[in-house]
Image (spheres, grey):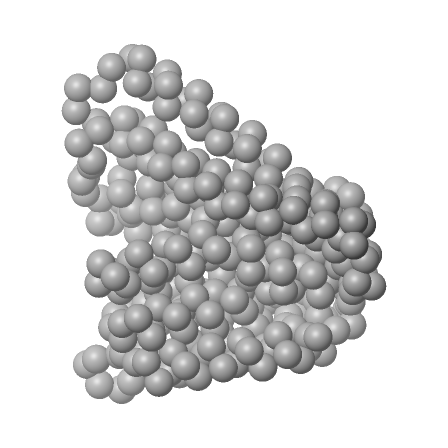
């Protein structure tokens, strides 16, 4: 009993610290961006996109450094499954989500393309340095496209923070940003250690722990952002959050184990986990798209998505 208690405490406290750190890191990053008058769209992409995905990235990097690539791969794929099924499902149950049709012409299409590219890269049951570089180049391509879009629709809407900003405030914000980054890395380290120890005690593979416990934990910032957005009726942010996070997980988080610790991909990833991720990405289009003016994810569709998540977790264990 004592063998399992410490890892569980480390895992739970790691998750709490991780969510708090990600929230504060994003908040202070936004302040810095506002001080330097960066476009709101760039803030959304770089600061919020990076902010909600830092837990996955750090956990993936630390696990890969320690040779636990199963945890890295499981964390990324599990987070994608969690985002579409649970995050979107819960958000739709709280309030039916109206989706803008343009999303499917650009962002969703790009997500579908990178998901299919990932399938091709994993087909040889190996994630190596070349695969990592290909995924990284897709990330650069996505950034280039988004920055181009931002320039086409450049406008400036800033928080009141930018007015009368003193040098001491700027210095304090930079210091807090560094402190938050340190706490992010420390909490990710706690999560990785706790996860590996729990897996050892229960005799479960690091892949399964990554797909379930760690994916749920690192996906909590996305869930918090989506619930807050749907309560404020900012439906575009909910869809943007899910698609953006999944893009980041697929092309940034999964590039990390390939670049740091090239290794074989567990057979289950190709036969069980990747097909579920692909199916949910296609289902995202089906539940959202209608060939009329309004595209709505209603409560019934929300329950269907949550049901699929339940089936997947049951299948894992």
Residue at image location 32% in from the left, 80% down from the top: 299
Looking at the image, is 20 positioned above or below residue 252? above
Locate residue 152 relative to residue 25 in the image: left or right: left
Residue 212 vs residue 1, the one in the foreground: 1
**Residue 138 in view here:** no
Residue 46 vs residue 208, the one in the foreground: 208
Residue 239 x/y as whole percent: 35, 65
- Quadrant of the frame with the C terminus: bottom right
Residue 203 x/y as whole percent: 82, 63
Looking at the image, is 193 positioned above or below residue 82? above
Query: Dividing the picture into quarters, in which one does residue 265 lie?
Result: bottom right
Residue lying furthest top in this view?
167
Residue 258 x/y as whole percent: 71, 51
**Residue 65 in view here:** yes
Query: Dividing the picture into quarters, in which one does residue 163 lie?
Result: top left
Residue 68 x/y as whole percent: 77, 51
- Number of numbered callouts drawn: 0
- Quadrant of the frame with the N terminus: bottom right
Locate residue 32 relative to residue 112 in the image: left or right: left
Residue at image location 63% in from the left, 60% down from the top: 213
Locate residue 283 relative to residue 40 in the image: left or right: right
Query: Dividing the picture into quarters, in which one does residue 26 lie?
Result: top left
Residue at image location 36% in from the left, 54% down from the top: 225
Residue at image location 67% in from the left, 80% down from the top: 315
């Amino acid at each position: 009993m004592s063998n399992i208690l410490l890892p569980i405490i480390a895992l739970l406290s790691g998750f709490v610290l991780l969510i708090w750190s990600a929230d504060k890191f994003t908040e202070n990053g936004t302040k810095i961006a506002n001080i330097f008058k960066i476009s709101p769209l760039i803030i959304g992409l770089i600061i919020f996109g990076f902010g909600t995905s830092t837990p996955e990235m750090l956990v993936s990097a630390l696990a890969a450094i320690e040779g636990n690539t199963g945890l890295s791969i499981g964390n990324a794929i599990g987070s994608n499954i969690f985002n579409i099924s649970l995050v979107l499902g819960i958000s739709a149950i709280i309030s039916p989500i109206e989706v803008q049709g343009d999303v499917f012409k650009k962002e969703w299409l790009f997500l579908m393309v990178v998901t299919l590219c990932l399938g091709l890269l994993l087909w040889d049951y190996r994630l190596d340095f070349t695969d990592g570089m290909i995924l990284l180049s897709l990330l650069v391509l996505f950034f280039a496209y988004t920055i181009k879009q931002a320039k086409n629709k450049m406008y400036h809407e800033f928080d009141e923070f930018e007015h009368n900003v003193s040098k001491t405030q700027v210095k304090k914000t930079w210091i807090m940003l560094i402190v938050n980054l340190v706490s992010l890395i420390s909490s990710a380290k706690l999560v990785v250690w706790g996860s590996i120890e729990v897996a050892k005690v229960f005799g479960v593979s690091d892949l399964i722990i990554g797909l379930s416990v760690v994916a749920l934990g690192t996906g909590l910032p996305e869930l918090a952002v989506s619930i807050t957005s749907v309560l404020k009726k900012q439906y575009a942010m909910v869809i943007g959050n899910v698609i953006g996070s999944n893009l980041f997980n697929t092309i940034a988080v999964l590039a990390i184990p390939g670049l740091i610790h090239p290794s074989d991909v567990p057979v289950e990833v190709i036969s069980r986990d990747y097909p579920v991720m692909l199916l949910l990405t296609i289902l995202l289009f089906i539940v959202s798209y209608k060939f009329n003016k309004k595209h709505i994810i209603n409560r019934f569709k929300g329950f269907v998505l949550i049901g699929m998540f339940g089936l997947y977790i049951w299948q894992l264990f």
